[in-house]
Amino acid sequence: MAIPLRNSNEIQKLRVAANAVAQTLKYLEKNVKAGMSLLEVDKLGDDYIRSLGARPSFKGLYGFPNAICTSLNEVIIHGVPTDDILKEGDILGIDIGSEIDGWYGDAAITMPIGKISKQDEDLIACSKDALYYAIDIIKEGMRFKELSLALEEFILGRGFVPLVRFCGHGIGKEPHCDPEIPNYLEGKKAKQGPKIKNGMVFCLEPMICQKDEEPVIDKKDNWSVRSADGLRTSHYEHQVAVVNGKAEILTTI
């Protein structure tokens, strides 16, 4: 595994692409409401990210048909926008990618539609808190497997389970590259595998299920990843760069 190490100029270019994602997520968080269709949400995001001078990088990536992933309720990731209407009490995952001058940005949130249940509040908080916890403990020399174990333990400690067979990833001049970063420990040994180094840029994205960690791919669109237990899910993601021995969030305003 050859994990790229970025210099300060390259990290700044990634920061520009990542900032466009952050601005678009903030815009959607303020403007998406009950009564809108998922296709309308996609159009809002597509138009806004283009207004910032970025290309929505998910559109056409591996054949994905839209600009953003809209993952509703029991869809945890890769939700394809449809004419389904958002209702009060829903929870919506929004995942956005950008490309500016050949460099990529990527981040995601899960947002409430109006007033939601305490269970859904706790579900969303788990993915968000797990993400920030992981970012805070990153340090140069730590192994990626140690980071995965820490994420798993945090999620289980909240009473939820991490989705399996999907993971965080490196990012740079490609939207996805090494390393792969699961939200759980693969194998039994955390003290092995690649170490985190200054200059690495990657995306962490806790994907949270309630009981069953297995993914179910929607047979209609071949994209949407649903929870096997049919229960609601949550997903948060940030793009970070390792600078001066610790993680710095790039997908922020």
Image (spheres, helix red, strand yellow):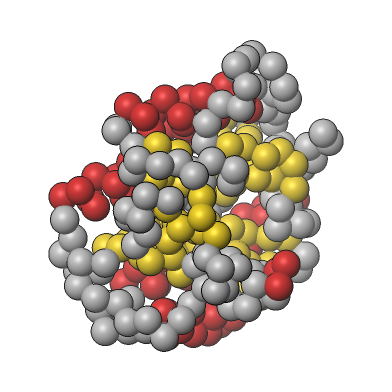
Image-based side of 121 in relation to 49, left or right: left
Left or right of 88 on screen, residue 123: right
At a point 47% along the width and 25% down the height, the residue shown is 150
Give the percent coordinates (x, y) of residue 130: 40, 37
234, above or below 245, in the image: below
Specify the quadrant that holds the N terminus.
top right
Query: In x, y percent, where is residue 117?
Result: 16, 56
Q: Quadrant of residue 146?
A: top right
Q: Residue furthest right?
A: 2
Q: Which residue is depicted at the point 32% across and 27% down?
A: 157
- Viewer-side residue, 110 vs 200: 110
**How many dots with numbers?**
0
Work out whether residue 78 can be spotted. Answer: no
Q: Position of residue 95 (x, y in %)?
A: 50, 63
Which residue is pictured at 44% across the width and 65% down the height? 71
In-front residue for pair 196/111: 111
- Do we see residue 225 in this rendering? yes
Residue in view at x 46 percent, y 31 percent: 151
Tell me if residue 109 comes above or below residue 211 in the rendering.
Answer: below
Rendering quarter of residue 195: top right
Residue 245 in the image: x percent, y percent?
61, 26
